Image (cartoon, coloured by chain):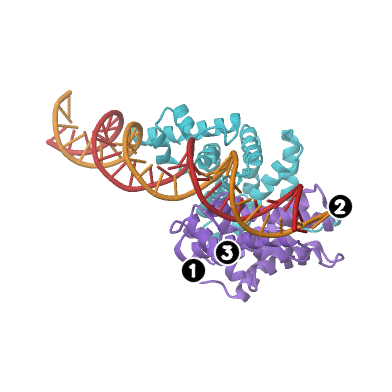
Chain colours: A cyan, B purple, C red, D orange
Amino acid sequence: MTSKLGHREAKKLQTWRSLANAAFELAAERGLHEFHIEDVAERAGVSRRTFFNYFNRKEEAVVAVVDILVEDLLVEFEQEPADESLIDSVCRLASRAATGERGPRLAALHELSNRCPELRPYALGQRDRMVRSAHEVLIRLHPELQDTLYSWLLLNVAVTAAEAALEFGHTGQPLSQDDLRARLDEAFDYLRNGFRQPADRR
Amino acid sequence: MTSKLGHREAKKLQTWRSLANAAFELAAERGLHEFHIEDVAERAGVSRRTFFNYFNRKEEAVVAVVDILVEDLLVEFEQEPADESLIDSVCRLASRAATGERGPRLAALHELSNRCPELRPYALGQRDRMVRSAHEVLIRLHPELQDTLYSWLLLNVAVTAAEAALEFGHTGQPLSQDDLRARLDEAFDYLRNGFRQPADRR
DNA sequence: TAAGATTTTGCCCTAAGTGCAATTTTTCTC
DNA sequence: GAGAAAAATTGCACTTAGGGCAAAATCTTA
């Protein structure tokens, strides 16, 4: 990740991460409106003006933690066995995204954007960028799928499925890892076999 | 729509629409940054302060036109024949959303949010709210699907399909109605029959 | 038509957001 | 390793967003 970066770029990445983490923590602790950009800068050990060199608004910084969480996912995705069914690869990708250590932090952000409606658009923007990055990787792995509806739909649908699995328990308490995996399996079963009426399938 | 509203509420709706339209027009004419909220208020014939009684930010007002475009769609959706396959209903809903007179304006907003990255999060937020509204209608029609992954996934996937069909021609010129319908059919074919590899299907 | 409820508006203040130039930090070259 | 070049950080100034508050205007109801 940080492997081949000069000192300068490493430091930039470092402050970027500090700012993103600080913003996320503050939002999680106090709520989106109960802190100022100056607070974020201070916690990140940097000046207010510098914050604006990295982000345009508070909300952007808060959701940016997702980038930190998923960057290694894309690397793993790029190394999937090429002979495997694409949908299996994507399914495992989505599964890894929603489970493991990532789960709690993603869920926290998710809950945060439920509590603060102003945050939601930016969370969605983040999701959108994530899908596009994944799509680029996918096209690099399968150039023959360039400009096909299939590739784009598959990824969007996979992320939607993962989200739905995450969000589905509207009950407040987080899902267990097993429950989450079961939901993901259900969702991907629809993807594999088509959206017939649920009644048809039972 | 406007049928059973008192004079007061009708007027509120009226100014809401004026503001949304004014914001959208200004954004389309000049670009998102080349006008101020004061301009929106002026064009809508209302004070600057009043703008903030309806929207929190410029971007919200710009994307709000979508609400005006889709409100009648949901009414139609609610009146679908109950004995029809749900996926057929949803498919027709998506098709109606993307084609006809709505198409150009939705495409315009879409293009606008490509030109102005700051707008994109709010466009996504709008889409999200739209899906949720549709989901509420769907649950009213099919209460047995409440709290199922199926209903939520189906709708998300349908909208994604419609969007992908709209967006897919990245070529600048808008798609013909026939092309668009063909893409929608392709997308919904995946939904009906599952996401096998494209190669498996030909 | 008068009292009550709701919306609009103006005033004012804080914080967001940005250009610019000075300053500090890193990189490059010899 | 010293000094020039490049890039990042910072402070300062200034415009606009965003929103609280109370007065004015408008609508509703009896």
The local secondary structure at tag 1 comes to loop
Mark 2 touches mark 3? (CB < 8 Å): no
Across and down, in percent, residue B64 comes to: 61, 58
Q: Which residue is mark 3?
A: B21
Which of discs 3 and 1 lies nearer the camera? The answer is 3
Determine crowd level at label 3: few under 14, some 14-19, many 20+ residues with C-alpha closer than 10 A: many
How many angstroms separate mark 2 from mark 3 (CA)?
38 Å
Give residue A176's position: percent from left, percent from top: 74, 33
**Mark closer to the chain start, 3 or 1:** 3
Same chain shared by disc 3 and disc 1: yes
Confirm whether residue A47 shows in the render: yes
Q: Is residue B30 above or below residue A130?
A: below
In the drawing, what numbered circle is on residue A17? Answer: none
Q: Residue at x 58, y 58 (%)?
A: B63
Secondary structure of the residue carrying tag 3 is helix
Q: CA distance from mark 3 to mark 1?
A: 24 Å
Q: Secondary structure at mark 2?
A: helix
- Label 1: which residue? B172
Front-most of residues C30 and B25: B25
Q: Looking at the image, which is closer to me, B175 or B126?
A: B126
Give whichever of B167, C1 is nearer the camera.
Answer: C1
In which quadrant of the rendered view does residue B11 lie?
Answer: bottom right
Q: Chain of mark 1?
A: B
* Dot 3 amino acid type: Asn
- Residue that numbered label 2 is attached to: B144
Amino acid type of the residue that numbered disc 2 sits on in the rendered structure: Glu
Q: Earlier in the sequence, mark 2 or mark 1?
A: 2
